[in-house]
Structure formats: structure tokens, C-alpha cells
Image (spheres, rainbow, N blue to C red):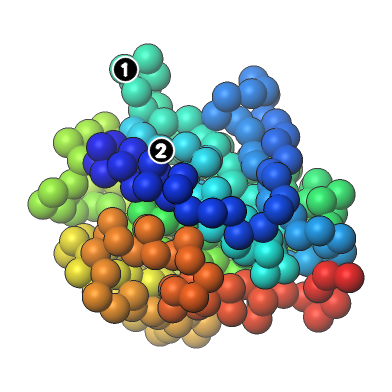
Amino acid sequence: MSTLFATLTFALATIAPLAANVPQTADYAVPMGGAHQVDVYAPAGARNAPVLVWFFGGGRSSGNRKQFAALGRALANEGVVFVAPGYQIRTPATPAVTARTIAADAGMAIAWTQAHIARYGGDPRSIVVGGYSAGAQVAALAVLDQHYIRDAGGDPRAIAGAFIMSGVLDVRPIPAGAPPAWTHDFGASEDDRWQLSPLKYARADAPPFEVSCAEHDPPRFPTTRDPFVARMRALGASVTTFTEENATHGTEFTRVMLPDDPLHQEILAFVKAHAAPRAGTK
């Protein structure tokens, strides 16, 4: 998986920047620096703009906050403040990192955004949380299992929505083709893994969700999306779905960076639809 993301990230570096803005970097947790930083891509002259906090993917063992830089530039050009948090990943130097570690980092990054995004022109009432692949799983978990944001000093009730792009929403089954460290990341027992499954925390008062998959995603994504969507709808929560047609897990990653891509437009529309009434730019 790391080779795939490295190749795609290199390819995206050749795409011309879609906005002139350069991200501003800030620390969101102690120890400062490294994984505990965010890049903020803000529209010029933004004031009370809608906000998207977006977590990168990479199987919890690769990737970084620069992975979606092209998406950040494009969305900033379209009036959205885009926040790209780093988080700790499992490497030979940090073997103890698990999905629970990452969820705690996500909670801190979201709480930081709530407290500080106004200085970048974002509206704290209009924060949508999302992510891709492993980042989608952690985004859904942090939004639904409210203690991660609350423990970091934030308000989980203030999240405006969640956009989940090809995330595993029930991590209890060990899927074919899953990273070999699945049980290290999520737990050795099914009960342990249930504690880190967004499906466990489905609730009627959740913020609006949209859950997307690529048409040719590996089965672990659509087969956990569908029960999640059914459970949320049964509870009365607002949840919609989207399929990126003629795409694989890798090609949807490349295509979403492009403003004319259908998934890109779906994310943009979702973020703007769930902005507070006064959100916008000058």
C-alpha cells in the first residue's frame, strides 16, 4: 500500500496548483511538530467559510498530511477552508501506534480546528470531518464515538457533517487483502475491534453523513458501508451514499483532486450544504 500511495502522490505533484494560496502550518497537540501538525488551505479573504477537516489514508502505516494537498488547493479555490491534519502512524520506529492512538490524534485535531479555525477565515459552526480509506475510518470513529473530541476539549455535538470516502466502518471481520497488522491496529479479539468500529456508535442524533465508495473498491469497503448506512437510517439519522463510477480504490484517490471530478463535486456540495447559514467568503 505504501508503494501505491507514494506513486500516486508523486504523480499528483505534477498537477499544476489550482489556487495561489500556500498552506499555513500549525501545531495541534503536544509534543508539537511532526505528526501533530495541520496544514490549513484557506481562500483569500475568507470569512466564516465552510470547513473540511480531512484525514489522509495509508493503512495506518504510511501517508502524511501532504497526501491531499491538491484537494486542499482546489477546495480553497472553491471557497472552503481545508484542514489537513497529520497523525501518528505505525512504523518500525513507532511500532506501538494503533488505531486507538490515531483516533485520539484525530480528536485533538478536530478540537484544535474548532478552537482556532476562525483566525483562518473558517466558521467553527460549519466544520465537516472526512477522510479517505484509513483516514475515513478514523474520521467516522472520531465523529461518532464522541469521547475522542470531548477528551481533547472540543464539542462533538458541533460537527456539521461527515464525508466518508472508502472507509471500513466495521473492523471486526479481518478482510481478505487487509494490511497484515490488522489485529495489532484494531485488537486481537472481535470485541476489541468492535470498540473501534464506527458501526458500533451509529446514533439517531449523529450529524449528517455521506458515505462513498469507488465502483471497483475492494469488498471490505462496500460490504461494511451498506450495514452502516442501513443502521443509521433505521435509527433516523441522515445518511446518503455516492459511488465513484469506473474507479478503483487508487484511481478515485487521483481523480478526487480534480475540480471537475464527480466525487470532488459531491464533497464540495456536501460541505457547502451543511455550512451554517452565514458561512461564505467575502
Residue 193 appears anywhere in the view: yes
Give neighbour class at mark 2: few <14, some 14-19, many 20+ (Cα, 10 Å).
Answer: many
Give neighbour class at mark 1: few <14, some 14-19, many 20+ (Cα, 10 Å).
Answer: few
Q: Residue furthest left?
A: 176
Q: Is residue 116 above or below residue 188?
A: below
Kindly identify which residue carries mark 1: 92
**Residue at the image point whose x is 29% and y is 78% from the top:** 245
Q: Is residue 18 above or below residue 94?
A: below
Residue 148 appears anywhere in the view: no
Kindly identify which residue carries mark 2: 63
The type of residue carrying mark 2 is Gly
Query: Foreground residue, 86 or 229?
Result: 86
Element carrying mark 1: loop
**Residue at the image point whose x is 47% and y is 37% from the top:** 64
> Percent x, y for residue 96?
37, 22
> Percent x, y for residue 7?
31, 42
The C terminus lies in quadrant? bottom right
Element carrying mark 2: loop
> Percent x, y for residue 58?
35, 42
Query: Foreground residue, 123 or 99?
Result: 123
**Residue at the image point whose x is 83% and y is 70% from the top:** 281
Relative to 248, is 110 on the left or the right? right
Q: Tell me the quarter of the picture where residue 127 sits.
A: bottom right
The N terminus lies in quadrant? top left
Q: Nearer the viewer, mark 2 or mark 1?
A: 2
> Percent x, y for residue 71?
54, 58
Relative to 244, is 66 on the left or the right? right
**Residue at the image point whose x is 67% and y is 76% from the top:** 272
Mark identifier at residue 236:
none
Distance of label 2 from label 1 (alpha carbons): 14 Å
The type of residue carrying mark 1 is Pro
